[in-house]
Image (cartoon, rainbow, N blue to C red):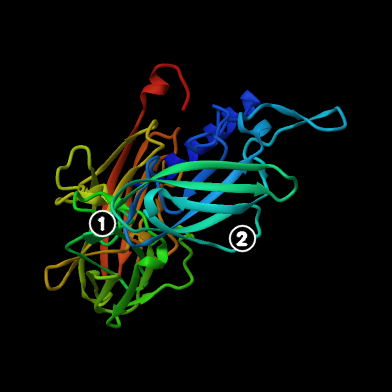
Amino acid sequence: MKQFLGLAVRLASISAAVVALGGCFPEHSDGEANGDTGALEFAVQGDRYDSPRVATGFQVEVEINRIDPQWQACVISKSIPNGSSRIQDCGALNTEPISLIDASCDDNACTITPETNSSGEVALLVTGTRDGLASLHVDVKSTTSSATWGDSFPLTFATATALSVHRQDTEDVKAGFSLMPGASFSWCPSLLDANGDVLVSTPSSITNAASGAAITVDSSANQGDASNCAEFRAAAPGTSSVTFNAQALSHSESITISDPNDIVAAELRPFLDSSTDADAGDGGATIASSPATSIDLTTDDFYGLSYASVLTLKDGSHALGGAGFYKASSEETVSILTNDTDPEMARTSMSVASMGSVIGDGTIDATIGTVKVSLPFHVSEGASQTDGGTN
C-alpha cells in the first residue's frame, strides 16, 4: 500500500544522509561483474531476480556490458593520464564500448539473435530450446582497442504452462468493485511454470486486446521497455474485457465501469495489511469490509493512514472512486493526499496524515454527486513530543 507522505519524508532523509556522508554506494563493491569470471556484466530484461528463469520457446533480451575495472569498486577518485585525479560519479559506472565476437549456449540449449546496438553494449535475443540449466557463453571485443573478453552466465529455461494477470496498483481494480469513468489502471501479465513461478520473456511476447466500450487502451502511458504491463482508462459505464495471449496461452480479465448518477452512499474503508490478512492475495492489501467511523492520528503519524473511497450504488453493488473530493476542515492539522491525477470522481484511494505539530479535532468531508459524507478526526500528541524529541 502506498504511504504517500511517508515516502517523501523517507526520500528526503536518505538524500540528506548521502550528502552528510560525502560518499557513495557501490553497485559492484566486490570489484567484479556478475559473469562467471567477472569479466562481463549481464542483465536480463524484465528480470527481478539473481537467477533468472526464462520461458522456453520465448525470446528474452540479454544485455552485456564491460565495466571499466577502475570504476567497479566505486572508489572516491580515479587517476587519469595527466597524473591528476577526478572525483568519481558513483551513480553511473563507466563502461568499455564493446562489440560481439560470438555467443552460444551449452549443447545448443538456445538460439541467439544479436540486436543492432550503437550504445557500446551487446544485446542478444535468446530463445531457449529445452528446459533446464544452461550457460550463455559470450565473447566480445573492445571497439577502441585490441582487447577481448569472454564470460558466461547461467540461465534456467522452463516451459510456460499458464498466463496470469496481476492487477498492479494495490488500491485499484479490486475484485468485486467497479470503477468510475476516468480512472486509469494497469494490468501486468506474466508467464508461469508448472510450479507457479514467474518466467521471463520479452514484453512483445504477450499481446492484449480489449473488447467493449467501457475502457480504452491508454497508449500515452509509458511503463518502460522492460514491462509487460498494459495501461487502460475507464471510458464510460458498462463492462469490458481484456484478453492476453502468449503463443498458445490465453487469459481474460473483465472490468465494470459504473455510472456516477447511481451513487447513493459513500464511505472510507481502511486497507488491511497483507501480513495480517490471509485474503490479501497478490494485490498486497485488501479493503476492510466495514467503513471507518473516525480517524485517530498522533503527531508522529506523518506517514499517514490509507483508505479506499468506497461508493454504494443504487443496485447495492460497490464501486471505488470519489477520493479526490475529500477535504480536511483543518489543513494545518492533517493533510489528504491521493495517489494519482485522475479526475476527482475517478480517484480510488487516499492517505490521511498528521502535519506533525498541531493537535486538534476536525472532520474529513466530501460531496460526491448528491451524497455528502463527514468523518471526524482527532490528532493527539505523539511519543516524540512527550519524550522530548522531534518529528
Q: Earlier in the sequence, mark 1 or mark 2?
A: 2
Q: Height in image: 150 above or below 263?
A: above
Q: Height in image: 312 above or below 365?
A: below
Q: Name the image quarter holding residue 6.
A: top left
Q: Name the image quarter holding residue 15.
A: top right
Residue 210 or residue 58, whichever sits in front? 58
Residue 319 or residue 97, whichever sits in front? 97
Q: Which residue is mark 2?
A: 117
**Residues at marks 1 and 2, CA–CA distance in whole angstroms:** 29 Å
Q: Is residue 290 visible?
A: yes
Query: For the view shown, which residue lies furthest in the left direction?
Result: 316
| Image coordinates for residue 111, horizontal then vertical, percent | 42, 60
Circle 1 Cα neighbour tier, 10 Å, few/some/many (<14 / 14–19 / ≥20): many
Residue 387 or residue 219, whichever sits in front? 219
| Image coordinates for residue 135, horizontal then vertical, percent | 41, 44
| Image coordinates for residue 191, horizontal then vertical, percent | 29, 58
Circle 2 Cα neighbour tier, 10 Å, few/some/many (<14 / 14–19 / ≥20): few
On residue 159, which mark appears? 1
On residue 359, which mark appears? none
- Badge 2 amino acid: Asn
Q: Residue at x 47, y 52 (%)?
A: 104
| Image coordinates for residue 144, horizontal then vertical, percent | 75, 48
Q: Is residue 328 visible?
A: no
Q: Height in image: 185 above or below 151?
A: below
- Badge 1 amino acid: Thr
Residue 159 or residue 310, whichever sits in front? 159
Which element carries disc 2, helix, strand or loop?
loop
Which element carries disc 1, helix, strand or loop?
loop
Q: Name the image quarter holding residue 246.
A: bottom left
